[in-house]
């Protein structure tokens, strides 16, 4: 199985429903051709660094999907190219580090330097949180009584 | 009277000695550079939007190449500018 990621920018002039339906079209197109969707990410409206087709902002979407081979890529890219609602698109093949990075990002681990360390920290925090939470309200309550 | 030991510290001995540069990707074990994270990539470009050389960033060759690819992808998706002024 190969994992790919396609990011594209949808014209922001369209209404919210049209933007969603545009993204849905490509999700369906991928699914109909045997792709297994891993993750759909709506990155929202962002300012473009430079104007494209006289638009200064765009709605970013990112689809991550698995396919047996890359034979559907040219077909999907052609569809994106012909679509006037799409400002830009980019298909990238993910290596094992990319797959892991995206998984970590989804689980909220990115932003810390080491994913393994941050996992451990999170687990510790969870344990601590369970222990400390019941104590804190009690302490607050006792202090308020004293006041 | 200042003794010889005191005079030794009148000038900072660290002035002029450069801090050793290192590759942050190797040091912190970052394996993948995301092209959809323009704020991170901003560290590797100058204020004109040009990619900084390895001798300034300290990246190892392997990761400098990956940074360059990520920046070029981000530029294509209009997350970073191709040409600009006063970016920072």
Image: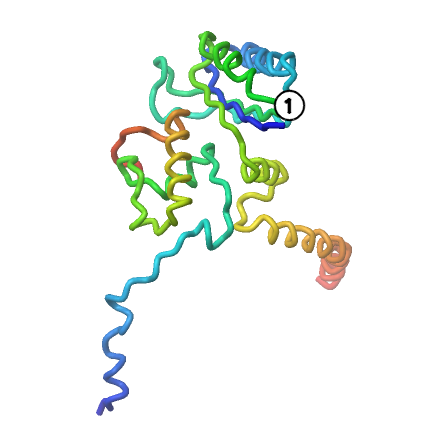
Report helix, strand or loop for mark 1: strand
- Left or right, residue A96 beside residue A36: left
In the picture, which quadrant includes the N terminus of chain A?
top right
Q: Residue at x 24, y 66 (%)?
A: B16
- Left or right, residue A37 beside residue A19: right
Q: Mark 1 highlights which residue?
A: A37
User: Residue A106: horizontal and vertical position, in percent?
Assistant: 61, 36
Q: Nearer the viewer, residue A142 or B44?
A: B44
- Left or right, residue B2 beside residue A26: left
In the picture, which quadrant includes the C terminus of chain A?
bottom right
Question: Within 10 Å of the Cα at label 1, are there few (<14), some (14-19), or many (20+) other Cα atoms?
Answer: some
User: Residue B27: horizontal and vertical position, in percent?
Assistant: 47, 55
Question: Up-down: is B16 above or below A141?
Answer: below
User: Residue A100: horizontal and vertical position, in percent?
Assistant: 59, 39
Count of all numbered marks drawn on residues in the image: 1
Q: Return the chain for callout 1.
A: A
User: Residue A64: horizontal and vertical position, in percent?
Assistant: 58, 26
């Amino acid at each position: 199985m190969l994992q790919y990621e396609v990011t594209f920018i949808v014209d922001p002039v369209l209404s919210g429903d049209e933007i969603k339906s545009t993204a849905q079209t490509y999700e369906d197109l991928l699914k109909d051709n045997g792709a297994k969707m891993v993750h759909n990410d709506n990155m929202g409206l962002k300012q473009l660094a430079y104007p494209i087709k006289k638009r200064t902002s765009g709605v970013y979407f990112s689809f991550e999907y698995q396919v047996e081979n890359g034979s559907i890529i040219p077909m999907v890219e052609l569809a994106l190219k012909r679509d006037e609602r799409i400002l830009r698109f980019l298909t990238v093949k993910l290596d094992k580090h990319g797959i892991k990075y995206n998984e970590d990002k989804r689980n909220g681990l990115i932003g810390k330097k080491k994913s393994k360390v941050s996992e451990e920290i999170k687990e510790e925090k969870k344990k601590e949180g369970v222990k400390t939470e019941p104590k804190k309200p009690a302490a607050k309550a006792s202090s308020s009584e004293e006041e | 009277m200042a003794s010889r030991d005191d005079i030794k510290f009148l000038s900072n001995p660290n002035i002029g000695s450069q801090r050793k540069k290192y590759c942050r990707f190797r040091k912190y074990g970052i394996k993948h550079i995301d092209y959809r994270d323009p704020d991170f990539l901003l560290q590797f470009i100058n204020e004109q939007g040009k990619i900084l050389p390895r001798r300034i960033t300290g990246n190892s060759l392997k990761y400098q190449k990956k940074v360059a690819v990520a920046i070029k992808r981000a530029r294509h998706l209009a997350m970073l500018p191709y040409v600009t002024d006063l970016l920072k």
